[in-house]
Image (cartoon, coloured by chain):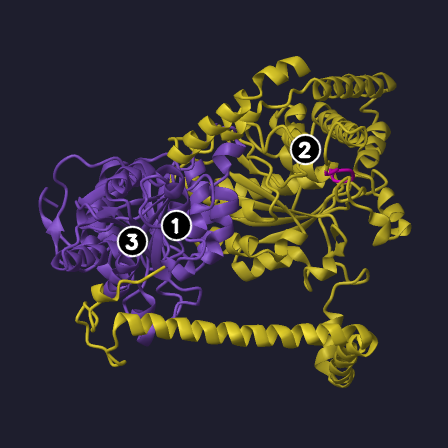
Amino acid sequence: MAPGEKLPIAKAINSSLRKALENDPKVVVMGEDVGKLGGVFRVTDGLQKDFGEDRVIDTPLAESGIVGTAIGLALRGYRPVVEIQFDGFVFPAYDQIVTQLAKMHARALGKIKLPVVIRIPYAGGIGAVEHHSESPEALFAHVAGLKIVTPANSSDAYWMLQQAIECDDPVIFFEPKSRYWGKGEEVGRGIPAPLHRARVIREGTDLTIASYGPTVRTALQAADASAEEGRSVEVLDLRSISPIDFDTIQASVERTGRLVVVHEAPVFFGSGAEIAARITERCFYHLEAPVLRVGGFHAPYPPARVEEEYLPGLDRVLDGIDRAMAY
Amino acid sequence: MTVDSTARATTRRSGVKRTTKKTASNTETATAATSEGQSTGAGAAAKSTKSAGKTGGTARKTPAKKAPAKKATAKKAPAKKAAAKAPAGKKRAAAVPGEADRPEMVQLLTPEGQRVEHPDYAIDLGAEELRGLYRDMVLTRRFDAEATALQRQGELGLWPSLLGQEAAQIGSGRALRPDDYVFPTYREHGVAWCRGVDPTQLLGMFRGVNNGGWDPNGNNFHLYTIVIGSQALHATGYAMGIAKDGADSAVIAYFGDGATSQGDVAESFTFAAVYNAPVVFFCQNNQWAISEPTERQTRVPLYQRAQGYGFPGVRVDGNDVLAVLAVTRAAVERARTGEGPMLVEAFTYRMGAHTTSDDPTRYRSDDERESWEAKDPILRLRAYLEAEQLVDDAFLASIDEESDTMAKRVRESIRTMPDPPAMSMFDNIYADGHALVDEERAQYAAYAASFADTDEEGR
């Protein structure tokens, strides 16, 4: 990949993995169908051909086994980058991630490191069958010892994956699968921002939308639509869910006085709830309205034919803006 | 809350064509509210029905309770009948290994201390090595007894005793090289001893001063793992790494009979077999998973599980330190030379309780324990050493003395083991730091500091 080349997110991730495999012989990519097939989304396309079966490893169909053996490889000095094929398939590995991976560094009083990256294509909007459209980030954010990030554009996808692989902690890397094959964007130029820093991607004065992953694009559309209605909406791309860059959110809310958090995950006990609580505490005297959330319902992810009604699409985000402005 | 309806468009502003009616956002909200109200109503109705049932339930307690019991009986009855009629059912029952058809196991030293030979596994140890194994087992048992006593005295919150499993642990532990790697459960005190882990380090987590506490790479002895079977996968992954490195080290994964029911153990067998990983699966079948006998975990002898995964399995007399050493050496050698994994089932017995919180009298008989006492791993080696005149009274006395010294050291070190400072709960959560941890650490420090004066007075 040439710096500045325009790539969709899937190809940016592929380039990033390729770079990591080139740079560090200890990096291994492992998961179901990541070899010859190149992954079900073709994100690992061509990597096994170039780096061999020893470094791009097709695994048995056992998620707990994938993460559990990745832990063992990390203990041996490797830096495994694990692919979980779909969001809803991560739960067989939940115990290994939460009980083992997250805690091992602390249990050994810092004597060992667990540089494991778990890539998970997540979120909906692709018309898939059940278990293929979920957003389980909050289930992991609740666990100390894990870091959770999610890029929303190609440049971040490239750089953030580099940073996640270089990080000595376990990182769950949520990839917005509905954006995988979108329009190509410039990749590999400039200096990457710190991994856990949120970014103001559109400035505004009336209200702040905090979004991440697949909802960033929706938030920008909502800001455009609002501008036509004479409202100035600021949009944040949080990029990191654990830790969350509350300083950037706070600074924005102190300017605008209103905050709407948008994510595909159910709002109940979701990251929006945490953001609402903390921002209320930090910005109580700046808030003109309660922090509102727009996201998934307390329902199983619905069948694909009605997912557009479940997802926080443009209309529901605009509705959230309306409600926040009405105070 | 008032909604500014003028701000709302009459159609969806996204302009997305929908098959559903094009209503205003207001209506959408209203509809949602209505359906929510309805569902709440339905929920409330369901609740009230339930609670009504509950209220009535007090009066009808007996029949209500009996009903499901009857159902269960009704369900069971035909099954029983079918089993009695169908020869297949009978066959299946007969496949469970009982005392009569218990499979052969590798033994090199009988319970009476007689040396016997085995066609596949030989061992030839010098006097010094034999005495060393005896010393290891006696010291391990003494350490274990001391830890149990320390729990009774309130110095430890809990202790999982290894009593009875000394031969399985010392025999396997002494089959390893320093560059091999051990993944233990939480009961491998004897293996830890073989690895050179200071016994006092094992006590930290049971005292509650840490959650692991030692450097796994210090002795190539991983942290104790409490969730059953998880470590079998870590061992397999580590072994995959050894293979990638082209090294000839081996990994040994310890687990118990109960753990064989865990998916992680099954998955570790699959991964190890598929990648031909240099790992020895060492199952100490001590007959009991807390209160559940091995019959609750398996219908075939555990070592036979390996066959289905494509690697060898063998049952060894887990109370015979020579046989365990010989079999583990062979298994480790296989791993070193690229022949892949092997399952060793050490057939042994947990002489004590599962942990100090357990009460085995509730689920097993004294007779059973007595029958295993006759197979004691230390007594049989001692009988052999004495018969062969490889030990004298002076040696035996020196081991006892060493045991006393070690026990005293353990006692003293536990009593002076300091509690960690409360602030240490924020340490080592992340290797590269985390903003939330930093924030909460600072908040807690400020909170704790607000008591500083009172604290000084108190102390």
Quadrant in the picture for residue B209: top right
Q: Helix or strand or loop: what does disc 2 sit on? A: helix
At mark 1, the secondary structure is helix
Mark 3: amino acid: Glu
B360, above or below A299, in the image:
above
Is residue A270 depicted above or below B199 in this figure?
below
Distance from disc 2 to disc 3, alpha carbons, whole Å, reads: 41 Å
| Structural crowding at the residue carrying mark 3, measured as other residues with C-alpha within 10 Å and reported as few (<14), some (14–19) or many (≥20) | many
Please state the chain letter of the residue tagged with numbered disc 2 in the rendered image.
B
Q: Are marks 1 and 2 in contact (CB under 8 Å)?
A: no
Quote the CA–CA distance across marks 1 and 2: 35 Å
**Magenta region: which residues?**
B160-165
The chain letter of the purple chain reads A
User: Is A119 covered by the magenta stretch?
Assistant: no
Disc 1 and disc 2 on one polypeptide chain? no
Q: Are marks 3 and 1 on the same chain?
A: yes
Q: Position of residue A93 (x, y in %)?
A: 47, 53
Q: Colour of chain B?
A: yellow
Residue A28 appears left or right of A43 = right
The crowding category of the residue bearing disc 1, from other C-alpha atoms within 10 Å (few below 14, some 14 to 19, many at least 20), is: many
User: Residue A271, labelled with which disc?
Assistant: 1
Q: Chain of mark 3?
A: A
Front residue (pair B138, B187): B187
Residue located 74% across and 48% down the image: B286
Mark 3, residue position: A175
